[in-house]
Amino acid sequence: MRKIIGLAILLAVAAVASQATVVLTFSGFQQPYETILNYYNGGFGGSGSGPGPNYGVVFGADALALPNGPGSNVCCEPGGSTGSMIFLTGADVMNVAAGFTTGFSFYYAAPYYTGSVQVFSGPDGTGTQLASLFLNTNGSYCGSLIYSCWTPIGVTFSGTAESAVFAGTANYIAFSNVTIGSAIAGTPEPGTLIMFGSGVLGLAGMIRRKLTL
């Protein structure tokens, strides 16, 4: 009976986790301009940072993490983040193998050039385009550096997405707090884990009652 209960709880954990909101802050990288690659897939960045958290998220080879510090023109990221993301070329892709629903959002700094982000149902920007965001320029020097004026932007969509394509002028737009599963950028509500825990405990109790009747 205990094995059955344990399996049911694990399945419930997996189901809730697949729907959870994930926020990528790009704060765990040790080297400026380090390729992100598999860092958010439980792996390593191009310069060896990691292993990172396993969110099932993989970036293309031109997506770079930029931690605050020497050599960075970025600061004042929202939500306490100390890192951001840029692209070496004008576009790159973020793939989420398990897919995500509900929404997609982030903060961006674009002092010089506009950009765009499209959300697709398939990997690598394939399948149906589910949503599109246009990024206007938003100023410079809100803090001590050029890339310090941050604008939140997000979108809701129907269906399940597996990729997002970031496009714009190479090396001229910074992104922070990229949020998968919500149209509001930032950290998930603190109560989410509490509610999740209560749900799992309730499920375990319900299964136990059914098995002992």
Image: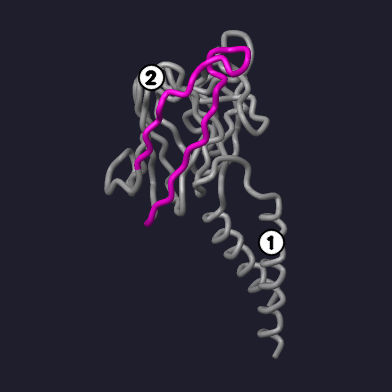
Where the C terminus falls, by quadrant? bottom right
Residue under circle 2?
A: 113
Magenta stretch? 132-159
Residue 206 vertical placement versus 160 (above, below):
below
Above or below for 115 versus 119: above
The image position of residue 148, as x and y in percent, is 57, 20
Q: Is residue 78 above or below residue 148?
A: below
**Residue at figure coordinates x 54%, y 32% from the top left:** 39
Q: Which mark is residue 69?
A: none
Q: Secondary structure at mark 1?
A: helix
x and y, in percent, of residue 96 in the image: 44, 44
For badge 2, the amino acid type reads: Tyr
Tell whether 178 sits left or right of 205.
left
Residue 30: name its quadrant: top right
Q: How is the image coloured?
A: one colour
Residue 156: say if magenta.
Answer: yes
Q: How many marks are shown on the rendered structure?
A: 2
